Image: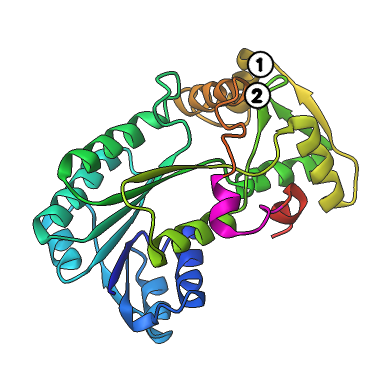
Amino acid sequence: MSVLVLGATGALGRLLLPELRKRNLAAADVTAAGRNQQVLDALAAAGYRTVRVDLDDADQIRAAVAGHDQVVLISGNDPHRLRQHRAVIDAAAAAGVEHFHYTSGVRADDPSFALGADHKATEDAIKQSGLRFTILRNGWYIENYIQAMHGAAQTGVLTAAVGDGRVAPAGRRDFAEALAAVVTTDGHDDKTYSLTGDTDYSYADLADAMAEVLGKPVRYQPVSAEQYQAILTGAGLDEGTAGFLAALDGNMGAGIMAYAGDDLTRLIGHPTMSLAEGLSQ
C-alpha cells in the first residue's frame, strides 16, 4: 500500500506520520507532501518519501498523486482552499486512486456554521467523483486554546462570547490516531465520522483547566459578541478578523463544537485526552 499525505508538514500531518508507522505502515510506503521544505527535509531523513506540492499548481498535484493507492487530504486554511481541494479530488479520480480520505469539520452540513461551507462543498465533490472515500469530520482542537491560555496567564481571565455554550474538543494526537486507523484498517468505505472529544465542557471548565496547567487562578468572563469584537479590535485586530472571531464564538455558544458522538473514541480505542493534558502540550 502506498499512501500520499497532502498536508504532511502541518501540525496534524506531522502527528499522523508516526501514527501510521505505529500501525506497521513503513515510512518508505508513505509520501509526505507539503510546502514547508525544512519539514520535508527532516521527514526525508526519517525515511519518508517526500514531495513539495503547491496546491495551486494542478500539474504538481497530478504528479504527486500518480502511483499512490490512497490519498489523504488534510484540509487547508487558504482562503481559496475549496478550489485546491477540488483539484486534488480531480487528480485522484483521474489517477484511479483506490481510497480518498478527507479531514472535514464537525457539523459541516450546518448552514449556520460559516467555517463548514468549504468542508461541505469538498465532501460533495468527493462523493460526486466516484472515489471510494472516508470523511473524518474533525471537531475543535484543544490546542486552539493555548494562545488564549497564554493571555489568561497574564490577566487571570478567559474572555469569550460563547455564553453558556459547551464544547467537546480533543487533542490533535487523538485526531491523528483516528486518521491513521481508517487509513490502515478495513471497514471504512464511503463512511463519514463525526469526531469530538468524550466530554462537553463549559468555558468555566476550560478556565479551571487553564488554572490547573498554569498553577494560578483563571476565571471565565463571558461578554457579548459586540464587546468581544471591541476587545479584539482594541488589541490590534482588523475589523474583519475581529468580526469573524466574534461570529465563531457565537457558533461555539450555539453548540457547533459540542459532543457529536463516540466515533473518535471508537476509532482510537481509548478515551480522548483531557483539557489539561491537551493544554499542557
Q: Which residue is mark 2?
A: 231
Q: Position of residue 10 (x, y in %)?
A: 44, 59
Magenta-colored stretch includes residue 267:
yes
- The correct choice, above or below, for 262 with respect to 37 in the image is above
Segment tinted magenta in the rendering: 263-273
**Tag 1 near tag 2, CB within 8 Å:** yes
Q: Position of residue 38 (x, y in %)?
A: 40, 73
Q: Which dot marks residue 46?
A: none
Would residue 236 be seen by someone viewing this image from the given angle? yes
Q: Amino acid at mark 2?
A: Ile
Q: In percent of the image, x 27 and y 73: which residue is there? A: 2
Would residue 15 appear left or right of 269 to someone viewing this image?
left
Would residue 80 be seen by someone viewing this image from the given angle? no
Q: Which dot marks residue 227?
A: 1
- The correct choice, above or below, for 128 with respect to 252 in the image is below
The quarter of the rendered structure image containing the N terminus is: bottom left
